[in-house]
Image (cartoon, rainbow, N blue to C red):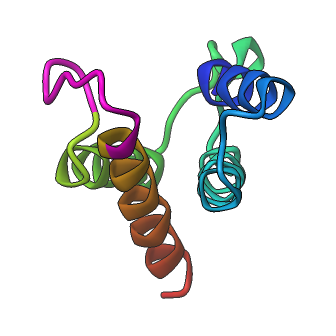
Amino acid sequence: MNGIWLGMTTGEQLGTLSKSDKKILHHLYSKLNQYPNNDLYSFVVLTEADKMNFEELREILRGAGLGLNISISVSMDSFMKQADELANKLESRSGQ
């Protein structure tokens, strides 16, 4: 989450993000921000439903080509395509 936020703010300040890139990153950030992501949740006991939700998120991330050792590319276009795909998958999931 911090990396996405840093990329958005730095890219905006440097003027290196297109309008489309900004939209994709903001959309992705808002979708991922719906999941617990800070130290407040480090000692929370997860229910089976919580575990299933996180496992589903892991599969969605992998399906979009994001995750540990899934793909490494220096291309911003490649990352933006993956980020857009992920945001769309999360959007369709939340609409269910």
Q: Residue furthest bottom?
A: 96
Q: Is residue 74 magenta?
A: yes
- Span highlighted in magenta in the image: 67-77
Residue 47 in the figure: left or right of residue 20: left
Quarter of the image where one finds residue 9: top right
92 magenta-colored: no
Rendered position, 58 above or below 21? above
- By secondary structure, the bulk of the magenta-drawn segment is best described as loop
Q: Which residue lies furthest to the right in this view?
A: 13
Q: Image quarter for residue 38?
A: top right
Residue 74 position in % (x across, y down):
29, 21
Q: Which residue occupies the foreground of this view, 30 or 48?
A: 30
Residue furthest to the left in view is 70
Taking 7 as reference, is 96 left or right? left
Q: Is the N terminus in the top left, top right, bottom left or bottom right quadrant?
A: top right
Image vertical order of residue 52 relative to residue 5, above or below: below
Outermost front residue: 15
**How far across and down, in percent of the image, does residue 36 sit?**
66, 36
Residue 5 spot, x, y in % from top left:
73, 28
What residue appears at the point 20 percent right and 44 percent down from the top-left corner? Answer: 65
From the viewer's side, name the closer residue of 68 and 83.
Answer: 83
At a point 55% along the width and 75% down the height, the residue shown is 94
- Tell me what residue is drawn at x 61 percent, y 20 percent: 3
The residue sitting at 39% across, 69% down in the picture is 89
